[in-house]
């Protein structure tokens, strides 16, 4: 197994809220789902129960 850490940095809260609303809409409307997301045709290559999703606050910020 490997640990992967990733994040999305949004330019502002309004942009984030609009994107999250669009993603939620796509996930709840089956007609808008991408066929690649069908678990029957394209199963996940790992155990999705082990995923962790969270929001974090930066502890240290580096500036140039």
Image (spheres, grey):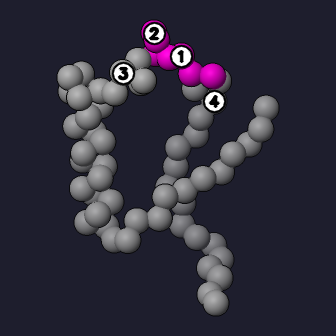
Q: Position of residue 51 (x, y in %)?
A: 59, 34
Q: Quadrant of residue 38?
A: top left
SS type, badge 2? loop
Q: Which residue is label 4 attached to?
A: 50
Q: Is residue 22 left or right of residue 39?
A: left
N-term-proximal mark, 4 vs 3: 3
The disc at residue 40 is 2
Q: Quadrant of residue 24?
A: top left
Query: Pointer 2 and pointer 1: residues touching (CB < 8 Å)?
Result: yes
Q: Position of residue 23 (x, y in %)?
A: 30, 42
Q: Is residue 28 magenta?
A: no
Instruction: Give the extent of the magenta segment.
Output: 39-45
Q: Give the class, few, some or many, for how many residues have Cα within 10 Å of label 3's Cα (few <14, many ≥20).
A: few
Mark-to-mark CA distance, 2 and 1: 6 Å
Mark-to-mark CA distance, 1 and 4: 15 Å
Mark-to-mark CA distance, 4 and 2: 20 Å
Residue at image point 27% right, 57% down: 17
N-term-proximal mark, 3 vs 2: 3
């Amino acid at each position: 197994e490997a640990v992967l850490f990733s994040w999305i940095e949004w330019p502002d809260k309004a942009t984030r809220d609009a994107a999250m609303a669009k993603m939620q809409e796509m996930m709840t409307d089956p007609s808008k789902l991408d066929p690649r997301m069908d678990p029957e045709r394209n199963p996940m290559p790992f155990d999705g129960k082990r995923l962790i999703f969270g929001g974090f606050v930066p502890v240290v910020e580096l500036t140039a």
